[in-house]
Every structure is written in C-alpha cells, then in structure tokens.
Amino acid sequence: MTMTAFVTGASTGFGAAITRRLAADGARVVASARRAALLARVAADHPGTVHPLELDVRDRPAVEHAIATLPAEFAEIDLLVNNAGLARGLEPAQDADLDGWDQMLDTNCRGLMYCTRAILPGMVARGRGHVVNVGSVAGAYPYPGGNVYGATKAFVHQFSQNLRSDLHSTGVRVTCVEPGMCGDTEFSTVRFGGDRERAHAVYAGMRPLGPTDIAETVSWAASLPAHVNINVVELMPVAQSFAPFQIHRNLPAPA
C-alpha cells in the first residue's frame, strides 16, 4: 500500500527535504506551506507524487477546509509531519519583541495543533497512522535568548508525549524529532530578521546538521514496522555538545 504523507512548512529547509525524501521512498506527499512559488519547485521534481498546497497553518478555518477538500488520492493521510515552525530574535525576555513571541506561539504551537486535530480523526478511524512532530533540543536545554522559542518546543515535546497516551490502542504512532544545530535552512536568517551575515556566523567553523539529516530521521522512524513506536529522537552534530551552567560572580574572592 502506498503511504500518503502531509508535510507542513514544505517549501524550504527541513520540510522540502522531508518531502523529497518521502517521495523518493515511494510515498504520495501533500506538501503544504505559505509560499506557493517555492512549493511549485518542490512539486516539479516529483510530478503526480507531490501535491502542492498553499496553506498558512496558523489559519484554523483554512487548515480545516484544506484537509477536508484534498484530492481523493491524497485524502487518507498515513503520516503527518508537523514541521512548520520558526524562531524570532535572541534577545533576553525583558527586551524581546512581543510580536515575535506571538508569531512563534501561533506557528510552533497553534499551527501544529490545528493540523493534528484536523488529520488525527481519519487516522484513528482507519486504525493506523503516524504523527511526527519536529521539536528541538531547545525544548529541553535552555540557553540565553531562547525564552519563548524554547518554551514552544517544550510544548511540542510534551504534546507529543500526551498524544501517545491519548492514542493508546488506536494503532496511531507519535514521534518527536528534536534536532540540535542545523544549517542550510532559513532558520537563523529568519531569527535575525534577514541578517544573513549574522545568521551564517552561527555556524562558522563547524559542521552542523543539515535538512537531509532530519529527512533521513523522519524517513527511518516512519519506515519501521507498525508495532514499533519511536517516542523521541534527539540528534546533534558532533561539533555540538553541552555547556556548563552560567555563573554570575559578584562577590569578593575568598581570602
């Protein structure tokens, strides 16, 4: 049976790589994103297999309508990849832009909820399916300036775990993929408001993960036998590891 997947944020970065990998694996893929022109390029590589869908996951009525009106051959979704997400700013909370906070909450949390809620009933009714949520190590390990971005990814992690509990005995699987530093995407450029020089500096002198690494991880988790559920995958580039706790020293040195 040919698998049908639905990928959000599929126009660039992780989403485009995941779409291409799943199509290469033989799946039919609904590739959704806001930028139709970029989606068309992804779909052009896999004619008839990738269905481009212009969609803003933050728009709940639009999500519900899009899912309800998919072409028949793409309507029964076996794999949902909630990939759409972003980070805005790296300022401390007291200086952060509230509009950026709202955008992260709307995309990273609400958009993920809307797509999941729209697609999940069909999976449960068919007794099969797989939800893969793209989180981040930022949901587990805090860092200066991570504030709301890290909080949204902690939501993705916990929402995934709670979905597993809700979906007990339904045959529907749930996986949370939590990458560390990833290059070759728009992530840092968006975070720094289009400042490409600052974005590129984040990855200077090291080799980060790339979109194909995340696509490989999603493909692997989705390809396992139906009785196997990968709960959480945390991956980092070898060049990244854990830092010591911050310590603010403002007392005189002991005598």
Image: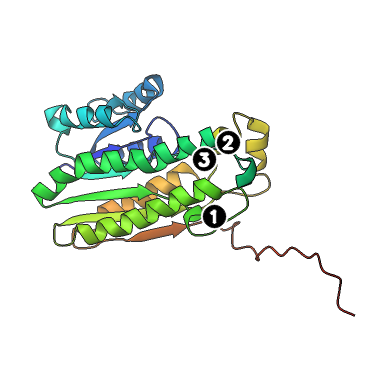
State yes or no: discs 3 and 1 in contact (Cβ < 8 Å).
no
**Which residue is found at the position 67% from the left and 44% from the top?**
204
State yes or no: discs 3 and 2 in contact (Cβ < 8 Å).
no
Which mark is first along the chain, 1 or 3? 3
> Which is more toward the observer, 231 or 57?
57
- Under mark 2, the amino acid is Asp
> Which is more toward the observer, 209 or 47?
209
- Under mark 3, the amino acid is Ala
| Residue 32 lies in quadrant | top left
Which secondary structure lies at badge 2? loop
Q: Residue furthest bottom?
A: 255
Which mark is first along the chain, 1 or 2? 2
Q: Give the residue at mark 2.
A: 97
Residue 179 image position (x, y, % from top left)? 47, 52
Q: Give the residue at mark 3.
A: 87
Q: Give the residue at mark 1.
A: 237
Residue 136 image position (x, y, % from top left)? 46, 51
Is 48 positioned to the left or the right of 238 in the image?
left
- Under mark 1, the amino acid is Pro
Q: Residue furthest top?
A: 37
Which mark is first along the chain, 2 or 3? 3
Q: Quadrant of the N terminus?
A: top left
Q: Quadrant of the C terminus?
A: bottom right
Q: Residues within 10 Å of mark 3 (few under 14, many from 20)?
A: many
Q: In 3D space, how far apart are the residues under numbered discs 2 and 1 (Cα atoms)? A: 30 Å
Question: Looking at the image, is mark 3 or mark 1 nearer the viewer?
Answer: 3
